[in-house]
Amino acid sequence: RGAPRWPSGTPLPVALTGWPRFFQSYAVEVDVKDASNATCLYAEWMMRFLIKYETNSSDYKNTTLHLSSSVTHNGSVCGNDTQAALLAVQFGEGHSWSINFTKTNETYQGDFITFTYNTNDTAVFPDAKRKGPITIVVKDIMHPVQLNNVFVCHNTDFVEAENVTQIFWNVTVQAFVQNGTISKKESRCHADTPTSAPTVPPTVANVTTASTTTLSPAPTTAPKPVENPDTGNYSLKSGNKTCFLATVGLQLNVSRDKPLLININPKTTSADGTCGNTTATLKLNDGNSTLISFTFVVKNASASVQKFYLKEVNVTLLNRLNVISNADNNNFSKWDAYLGSSYMCRKEQTLEINEDFQVHTFNLWIQPFLVKANKFSTAQECSLDDDSILIPIVVGAALAGLIAIIVVAYIIGRRKSYAGYQTL
């Protein structure tokens, strides 16, 4: 096995502009050589990691770990019929990522992904409670690829496990390269089309866009408003028991150069997250372009009467260049209810993430703690749904109107009563 090397010497930098909280990202290219200096494993891809970690104050924060301009590739191996191929990279302050590929008679595929992040990197993990390397191992989502084919996926894939979301895009990889030559035959991921390119935007459900196929000028009519999103039902389990229930319609409002409304389609959205005694997180992935997470905490955990509330919302969005924008607000104090009950709000609510991102909720019913028998407990309704306040308002308005009518009638009656008399 020959030592792996970088063909171009360094990773390829890609500047990201035009969205909030952008970081510089790097396309990694690795060309592993065998003993005869022929290519045996080739890969080029982009990736980023969203990580939730605990701080010294027992709060949880979200952070983004991205590849730096300095990446090494120690430990990568070619593999053969009996040994798995290994693609391994190291970057930043003690972070590393690797994937191994196994081979059958006619196909190869990714087996396991191993990711290690180091919370001693204070620039990425300020005030981390747990110090040192943390390793997670997850099953790869790559489907079997025909031998002597190169796997290509320009669209974005997500892998979530243990408070870590791994995000990959613009992937090109071939394991067990034959005769040292990268194949011209491509096996595309399901999200790609045969003609897709890195600049093709991901499909966004229920987004109204202007047509680009009309030859004549489009009529100057008002844009059709985006309808309210469909309501989805989501749940999390701890073992065999349901520990988190949520029913909600979600709409993302992005206010940049051109406002954009994105309805989250519950039919294509999957739920993941964590349940705990004092903290619970629901992560929703619409499978195309959006990740939204909601974190709830218990207020005054030591008090005899406890309440929970929404503390943090994180939004990750892919724009038209498959570039990732991340917005987070961990200073909420909303949707509070007594522990053991649920929270309900049928009317539309708006969560301000930052100046560019808003999340609108519809038909919300949520219970992040103490779910029993897979059912919502008694709900505490929001003030927007409380119609009881309208009763005194209506009664008061009616009384005021009646008094006004009586006063006017009295004044008119007095004027008429004086009309038939003359001064003597």
Image (spheres, rainbow, N blue to C red):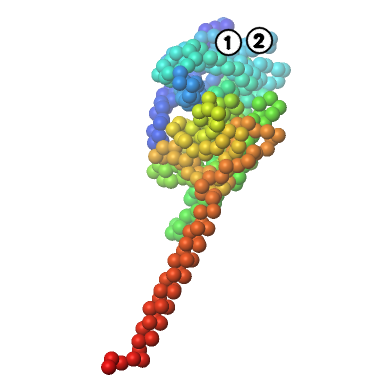
Return the residue at label 1.
Answer: 77
Splitting the image into 4 quarters, where does residue 410 fall?
A: bottom left
Q: Disc 2 residue type?
A: Gln
Q: Residue 156, image x and y in percent?
A: 54, 31
Res. 330 in view = yes
Residue 106 at x, y = what percent? 70, 20
Name the residue nearer the viewer: 14 or 56. 56
- List x then y, in percent, for residue 21: 40, 31
**Dots 2, 1 in contact, CB < 8 A:** yes
- Amino acid type indicated by mark 1: Val
Identify the mark nearer the N-term, 2 or 1.
1
Mark 1 lies on a secondary structure that is: loop
Instruction: Find the residue positioned furthest to the front.
Output: 424
* Residue pointed to by mark 2: 83
Q: 120 or 43, which is in the foreground? A: 120
Residue 157 screen position, x and y as percent: 57, 29
Residue, x 55% and y 24% (percent of image)?
163
The quadrant in which residue 328 appears is top left
Q: Quick check: 299 above or below 418? A: above
In front of the other: 378 or 53: 378
Q: Residues within 10 Å of mark 1 (few under 14, many from 20)?
A: many
